[in-house]
């Protein structure tokens, strides 16, 4: 029985994904839930497990290709799993054992690189010839590189969505010396650049796999260096541009005295880790304060659907996690139902699995509010971009001792700047500052037991 492997949806606003690496090749045996391939989106780089045990029969989408969610990317011969396990009855074993053996053999002799070559040559949408009156779709960076290297964009086949000429397309054209411009009326034919020019597997520029790429990955021109964006970085860029275009961003800044929390953590961190097995960080305190603020001011825990405002009953808190290769926002679902220990365990668990590429698709979906922490890197405060479809995001600055006025006297206290970026279509300044005041009050007057 053949089992289809599909491209999963890795977030509510994600409708496509890019396969960055296959962990198995056709003919390989695989167990259910064993990592099968890696994908990249603007929200997550993740290992996708096999939906069934058996033998990988066919890979339909090669490394570097971007396809819509629910696309069949491979098939698994589930019958191969039964054949690979010794049968208790000797008679069926003799009759059936020889049959599944040749099936992988038919696929295995073809080297993995060659199946990738065929889609690479046919995957790009056909490019309209120069002079047909259609606008050439490309970014300002692509057009600048074309100008600097005297490349005619009309002669460069676009491999991005809708035939757009991407950065990897123009860099490949520059490197091969093709696609030089010629006037439309000129009698001399312009040299052409063909899709066969890139390397057989699509190349580092086509795949976006920065870690596994070879010299084609970077290009040097005079006093600057060009590095192709990873697939994840491209998606992050698109997501951020969309957010700034859709949401009119407004910012509010508050300062909180967290001396009590700092003292509590210093006193309890060893005992907390001993009893719970989880390190005590500051993040659970801020998550709890944010949840209390969202419950008091539900407009901040909302999203926009056309001309409707959707007020969410659950507080699903997205926590931005910095990775070596990008940024990811795993989600603590129903945070309002968890006690402090539950929040601490969820924060640690999601962060660790995000860095290990072990997050499940549902764990990066359905956030209603987000928190980012530039303070962990020493940032005084930041003004973050809203994580769509949320209408607000809380930024945490570094906690540091500063002189403050307490009862008309100068005192040293542990202070932190809090920033709220909010969508002015839904959240007004008055509500934003009331929300921030509630968060500040919760942090400065902490009463919840942590064990």
Image (tube, rainbow, N blue to C red):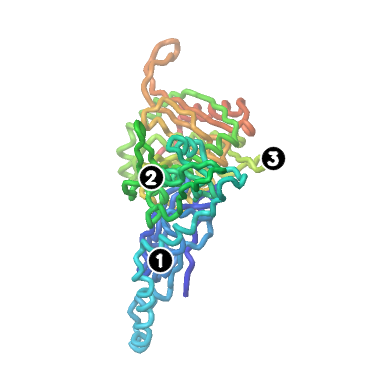
* Residue placed furthest toward the top: 408
Classed neighbour count for the residue bearing mark 2: other residues with Cα under 10 Å, few (<14), some (14–19), many (≥20): few
- Residue 259, percent from left and from top: 39, 25
How much space separates mark 1 and mark 2, taking CA atoms? 43 Å
Q: Which residue is mark 1?
A: 32
Please indicate, yes or no, whether residue 422 appears anywhere in the rendered image: yes
Classed neighbour count for the residue bearing mark 1: other residues with Cα under 10 Å, few (<14), some (14–19), many (≥20): some
The quadrant where residue 379 appears: top left
Marked residue nearer the N-terminal end (1 or 3): 1
Element type where label 3 sits in the image: loop
Please indicate, yes or no, whether residue 329 appears anywhere in the rendered image: no
Marked residue nearer the N-terminal end (3 or 2): 2
* Residue placed furthest toward the front: 187
Element type where label 1 sits in the image: loop
- The numbered dot on residue 439 is none
Asked if residue 380 is positioned above or below residue 283 in the image, the reply reads above
- Residue 444, percent from left and from top: 46, 26
How much space separates mark 1 and mark 3, taking CA atoms? 44 Å
Check contact, mark 3 vs mark 2: CB within 8 A: no
- The numbered dot on residue 175 is 2
**Mark in the foreground, 1 or 2:** 2
Q: Which residue is mark 3?
A: 307
Q: What residue is shown at x 43% (from left), y 34% (from top)?
A: 373
Nearer to us in this view, 221 or 283: 221
- Residue 349, percent from left and from top: 39, 47
**The C terminus appears in which quarter of the rendering?**
top left
As drawn, is 133 to the left or to the right of 112? right
Q: What residue is shown at x 41% (from left), y 23% (from top)?
A: 415
How much space separates mark 3 and mark 2, taking CA atoms? 49 Å
Classed neighbour count for the residue bearing mark 3: other residues with Cα under 10 Å, few (<14), some (14–19), many (≥20): few
Asked if residue 56 is positioned above or below residue 404 in the image, the reply reads below
């Amino acid at each position: 029985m053949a089992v289809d492997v599909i491209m999963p949806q890795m977030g509510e606003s994600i409708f496509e994904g890019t396969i960055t690496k296959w962990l198995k090749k056709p003919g390989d045996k695989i167990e259910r839930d064993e990592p099968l391939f890696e994908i990249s989106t603007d929200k997550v780089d993740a290992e996708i497990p096999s939906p069934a045990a058996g033998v990988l029969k066919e890979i339909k989408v090669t490394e570097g290709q971007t396809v819509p969610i629910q696309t069949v990317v491979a098939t698994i011969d589930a019958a191969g799993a039964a054949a690979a396990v010794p049968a208790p009855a000797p008679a069926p074993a003799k009759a059936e054992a020889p049959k599944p053996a040749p099936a992988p053999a038919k696929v295995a002799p073809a080297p993995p690189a060659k199946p990738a070559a065929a889609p690479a040559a046919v995957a790009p949408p056909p490019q309209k010839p120069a002079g047909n009156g259609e606008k050439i779709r490309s970014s300002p960076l692509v057009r600048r590189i074309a100008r600097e290297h005297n490349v005619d964009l009309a002669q460069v086949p676009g491999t991005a969505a809708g035939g757009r000429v991407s950065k990897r397309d123009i860099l490949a054209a520059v490197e091969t010396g093709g696609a030089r411009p010629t006037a439309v009326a000129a009698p001399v034919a312009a040299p052409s650049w063909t899709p066969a020019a890139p390397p057989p597997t699509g190349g580092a520029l086509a795949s976006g796999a920065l870690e596994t790429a070879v010299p084609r990955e970077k290009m040097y021109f005079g006093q600057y260096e060009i590095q192709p964006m990873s697939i994840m970085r491209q998606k992050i860029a698109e997501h951020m541009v969309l957010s700034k275009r859709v949401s009119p961003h407004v910012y509010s800044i508050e300062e909180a005295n967290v001396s009590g929390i700092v003292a509590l953590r210093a006193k309890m961190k060893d005992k907390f880790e001993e009893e719970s097995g989880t390190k005590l960080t500051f993040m659970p305190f801020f998550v709890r304060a944010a949840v209390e603020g969202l419950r008091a001011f539900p407009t901040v825990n909302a999203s926009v659907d056309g001309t409707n405002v959707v007020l969410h009953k659950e507080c699903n808190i997205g926590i931005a996690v910095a990775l070596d290769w990008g940024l990811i926002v795993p989600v603590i679902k129903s945070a309002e139902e968890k006690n402090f220990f539950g929040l601490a365990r969820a924060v640690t668990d999601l962060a660790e699995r995000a860095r290990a590429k072990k997050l499940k698709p549902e764990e990066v979906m359905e956030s209603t509010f987000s928190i980012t922490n530039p303070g962990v890197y020493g940032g005084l405060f930041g003004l973050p971009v809203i994580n769509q479809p949320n209408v607000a995001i809380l930024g945490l600055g570094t906690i540091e001792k500063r002189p403050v006025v307490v009862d008309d006297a100068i005192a040293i206290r542990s202070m932190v700047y809090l920033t709220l970026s909010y969508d002015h279509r839904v959240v007004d300044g008055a509500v934003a500052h009331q929300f921030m005041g509630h968060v500040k009050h919760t942090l400065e007057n902490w009463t919840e037991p942590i064990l």
